[in-house]
Amino acid sequence: MEQENTSASKAMLPVTRTKAEARQFYDRVSRIYGWMTGAFERRHGEKALELLAIRDGETALEIGTGSGHCFERMARLVGDRGGCCGADISTGMLNVTRERLLKSGLAAGAGLCCADAGRLPFPDNSFDAILMAFTLELFDTPEIPQVLKETMRVLKLGGRIAVVSLSKEGRASSAMRLYEWAHRKWPRYADCRPIYVERSMTACGYTVRSRARARMAGLPLDTVLAIKPDSTALH
């Protein structure tokens, strides 16, 4: 298994743009990001949110809020008795999400913070559910285990996590090869790339409950629902 994971990691393309470049890019496009991605990404994020089955009174976290469409729904689901937090590296994105919450009257019950997912500013065992849609594949390969370890740390025992990501599984389609070419040529703009989602999560100790495959503009997607096992030892 270790050899399989190692070879898989080598097959994933690197992310070469810096965190500062990522922050600047998403700050610049924050006002049009919802329009740019709405026809492609939103329905997959909403499907992952359905799989999480967030209940009234629970605590939930979204990592990579984007323009806040899914986060607004999460804030409604937890209700007045629950709590909802969102983290994003871009202050521009957070401002768009905050405006959305203000318009819908949900700002008082939701918290937003500018943070790197590799160092989440939350205590251990804080959340019942975590959503991460089109975010994990933005991290360079060595960073992915650290991000998942952080999600494991802040999840409660038995907590759920849903991850939506471009997938490296299966044969490479012409669309994937074209996208990976664009990622190599313009790494600051085509900054995400397909990754091994399920393998990465199981390697970090998650118990996978389901995996759904789909396509977005010809690119393969995986939506993985997993839990933090009750027997997980926190380090």
Image (cartoon, rainbow, N blue to C red):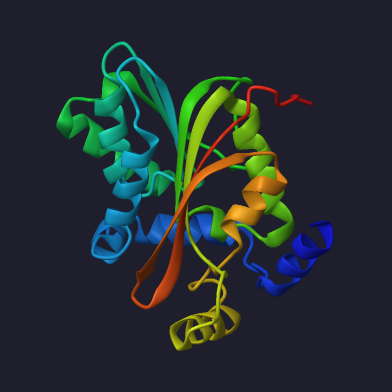
Nearer the observer, 197 or 231:
231
Image coords of residue 225 (percent x, y): 48, 43
127 versus 151 height, above or below = above
131 to the left or right of 70: right
Residue at x-position 57% and y-position 27%: 155
Q: Where, quadrant-wise, is the N terminus in this rendering?
A: bottom right
Query: Which quarter of the figure has residue 75?
Result: top left
164 versus 96 height, above or below = below
Which residue is outermost to the right?
3
Residue at x-position 37% and y-position 46%: 48
Q: Note whether residue 163 is visible.
A: yes
Residue at x-position 79% and y-position 26%: 235
Image coords of residue 38 (percent x, y): 25, 60
Query: Which quarter of the figure has residue 112?
Result: top left
Give the tally of numbered discs.
0
157 to the left or right of 218: right
Residue at x-position 55% and y-position 24%: 158
Q: Note whether residue 98 is visible.
A: no
Image coords of residue 171 (percent x, y): 55, 80
Image coords of residue 91 (percent x, y): 43, 44
Query: Which quarter of the figure has residue 72?
Result: top left
192 versus 109 height, above or below = below
